[in-house]
Amino acid sequence: MPSDRLAALAAAGVSIWLDDLSRERLASGNLAGLIRDKHVVGVTTNPTIFAAALKHGEAYDEEIRDLAARGGSVQDAVREITVTDVRQACDVFRATWEATEGIDGRVSLEVDPGLAFDTEATTAEAVDLWKAVDRPNLLVKVPATEAGLPAITSALAQGISVNVTLIFSIERYRRVMDAFIAGVMQAGANGHNLGSIASVASFFVSRVDTEVDKRLDAIGTPEALELRGKAALANARLAYAAFQKVFAQPEWHRLSSAGANPQRPLWASTGTKNPAYPDTYYVTELVVAGTVNTMPEQTLETFADHGEVHGDTVTGRAEESQQVFDALAVAGVDIDDVFKTLEREGVQKFLSSWEELGHTVDEQLSKAKG
């Protein structure tokens, strides 16, 4: 069976999440089928996903007509539509959540990306989304911007499970882990059950190669061209080494003994964008137990068809990964600027998709009103 390859990936300790959600997928039973047949144990969403779902389907027509009849605003409509989808998905994954004792069976919903540089507004929105969805297996997505870091701590301190998104650099990732541990400590002090709090840190992968390869092509030397396609995996493997170090510290062991769960690394942006690279590149080369790989459906199906699991392809590879970054610096790539560019573009992409989602809802509301 094709799913045997996915079974092998799951058996290697990788939680397979789907990077997509739509009303059609929910209503048709497709999502339940992926759980049953393809070992999918979670879902991530973002504004781009919701914009595409609204634009290319009729499953929302009835809700849009109802919202129009009630005179709902575009902002209210966007909130109601996304919360409804995520709540239903949480219900679909409830059995998975229970079977894994809250580790998997998680569904993510992102705060308004327009708030990415406003700590207080991001925190308030995280609280509102947590209450609106009202499901224990929700993860509220908060971007790892400078303003997002204290919001992560604040949300966790209130017992809210968090998916930290748009992480590109190791430096920022370390600060994300610090924000997570601080939040868990505060949650314990506030009387929350630490075992009920979950978090993942979404480390973006393929986008790093896209940006670095562009710069390597511009440099054009043989040494530079030889480094194409190596930065993203090296970055992710260094991130995992940082994860191992942080969660081996005595400070974390004390929290763990009180029931706290570690913040798992999540590999995001794992669809292969460059056709010159294997189409399962960012899955096969990032297999390590205790991590999540969230995939577009195309990547999921591709791996089910011919993906391979060669054991742990991450642990113990920090030294060679650092050598890749040293070589990139020698070749002339400003890696700090790469990460700043990717974060800025990442926020802008989600903001543009959020605006597109609003425009789509506005058009559909207007149409429903006649």
Image: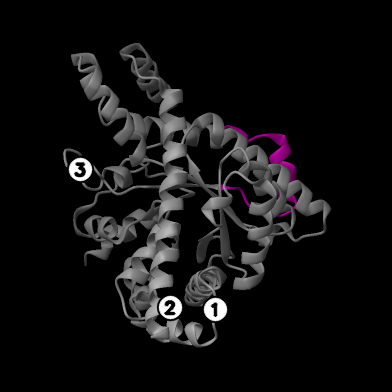
Quarter-wise, where is residue 44 in the image? bottom left
Q: Nearer the viewer, residue 179 or 344?
A: 344
Query: What is the distance, in whole Å, between disc 1 and disc 3 at their CAs?
Result: 47 Å
Question: What is the secondary structure assignment of the residue under circle 2?
Answer: helix
Type of the residue with mark 2: Leu
- Which disc is residue 72 wearing? 1
For the record, the magenta segment spans 244-263
Q: Amino acid at mark 1?
A: Gly
| Label 2 to label 1: alpha-carbon separation | 9 Å
Task: Measuring from the top left, give residue 194's x and y in whole percent.
Answer: 72, 57
Residue at mark 3: 278
Number of marks drawn: 3
- Secondary structure category for the residue under label 3: loop
Q: Is residue 309 above or below residue 52?
A: above
> Residue 64, image x and y in percent?
44, 81
Q: Residue at x 18, y 15 (%)?
A: 222
Instruction: Using a 10 Å C-alpha cutoff, classify the residue at mark 3 as few (fewer than 14 neighbours), some (14 to 19) or many (20 or more).
Output: few
* Residue that mark 2 sits on: 365
Residue 251 highlighted magenta (yes or no): yes
Q: Residue at x 53, y 72 (%)?
A: 83
Q: Are marks 2 and 1 in contact (CB under 8 Å)?
A: yes
The N terminus: image quadrant: bottom left
Mark 1 nearby-residue class (10 Å; few <14, some 14–19, many ≥20): some
**In this rendering, would 2 be left or right of 313?**
left
Residue 302 screen position, x and y as percent = 22, 56
Asked if the residues shown at circle 3 and circle 2 are in contact, with their CB atoms under 8 angstroms apart, the answer is no
Residue most toward the front? 370
Camera-nearest residue between 146 and 114: 114
